[in-house]
Amino acid sequence: MWKILLQEFYGDLKTQKLRAFLTVFALAWGTITIVLLLSFGEGLRIAVVDSLLNAYDRVFMIYGGETSRTYEGLPSGRRIRLTEQDGELLRRTIPGVELVSPSYGRGGTRLRAGDVSTTTYMEGVYPSFEAMRRMYPVAGGRFLNERDLAERRRVVFLGDSIAKRLFGGASPVGQTLLIDDLPFTVVGVMQRKLQGSMNNGPDADRAVIPASTFRAIYGPRYVNHLLVRPRDVESAEEVKAEIYRVLGRRYRFDPADERALSIWDIIEEEKLTRRIMLGIQIFLGVVGGLTLVVAGVGVANIMYVAVRERTREIGVKRALGARRRHIVAQFVFEALLLALTGGLAGLAVAAAVVFIVDGLPASNEAMEYLANPKLPLPIALGTVLALTAIGLAAGVFPARRAAAVDPVESLRYE
């Protein structure tokens, strides 16, 4: 049966070469359009979300605020300022908290290596800061560790950009760096990363030292902010409520007073970003889908023409005993073959374009967002399923019309 269907399809194709070619081209073009739109949209989504998480990986940034309600006889308008001990309190008393780090900050810090000097924003933190800010070291170096913290070591971890400015192409690890004229040993340099959200500048231009060392040198009483990561993002709201409760009890403010603390919720920001990017992908998919629908109309047209031009042939087949389902199968098969031929050719071309563009080196940060297409399996499978559906839809209606032809009338058709 398949051999007969293929022979008939090939015979019809020879008589309708131009129309068939244009139909296959339209389907290929539509497939290329939708696959490239979705692939570039997927790449943009991944880059945007990663750039956010590269700055703050599912954390709360907690700042002290000002009370807006009276509480237990205390007036409103009291300033709440956080300390390093508050972070330890949250870690001990809230089971849903996984990681905590204080952040002491100092802008305009002077760094000098040999004859090269610069200024930067420097932070004093805990070792857990590495995971929460994705400040991972390049090979041969490390981030700050617990021993650095306990012994108040003068060690520093540098962003990749500031390390290059200070040391050029040489490896800074193990070398001495002067920070505000005090000697520090460089223990690591950050891997390059795409960062879309910033706090006092990009991490690439940052110097990081142990919180204990920062406190010993500069003597701050209060932290700039606390970084807290919940164990489970699904329980983030409960953890946030517990933070207000625990610190509210410590500083005697109403736990419902949201102005007493300022919490930058990166978890909620990530969810919002993902929803926005999903909306963009849906829009791109609809635009590409409409192109495929137009191509499907072309398949339906060529099948209707084939029915009209082969009316006598259909009548002969019906007169010789061919059943309606045989006629339906013939035209549905031809429509599916046209749709899949054009679609798979377009999918192959689009996949090649995605592979080539994704392999190009990014010359700047904008290119890391835009020239970063990805073709995941669901998009490829979804495109193939869409093509199959278009082929069926474009073939069923002409096929039913062909099967309904009266054998006697069709033999007299001119």
Image: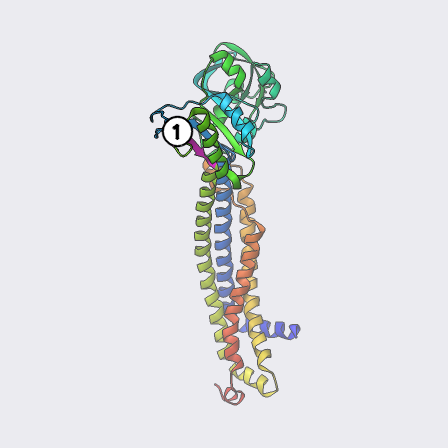
Count of numbered circles in the view: 1
Asked whether the viewer can see residue 152, the reply is yes
Identify the residue at horizontal 55%, vertical 64% (top origin): 388
- Residue 112 versus residue 131 in the image, above or below: above
Q: Position of residue 324 (x, y in %)?
A: 57, 81
Label 1 sits on what residue type?
Ala
The boundaries of the magenta stretch are 259-266
Element under disc 1? loop
- Where is residue 300 drawn, in percent x and y? 48, 70
The image quarter containing residue 187 is top right
Q: Residues within 10 Å of mark 1 (few under 14, many from 20)?
A: many
Q: Is residue 267 above or below residue 41?
A: above
Single out the residue that lies furthest toward the front: 73
Give whichever of 207, 345 is nearer the camera. Answer: 207
Q: Nearer the viewer, residue 137 or 40?
A: 137
Nearest the viewer among 238 and 270 is 238
Residue pointed to by mark 1: 260
The residue located at (45%, 23%) in the rendering is 82
- Please say if 23 is above or below 87: below
Q: Is residue 364 visible?
A: no
- In the visual, does 173 lie left or right of 55? right
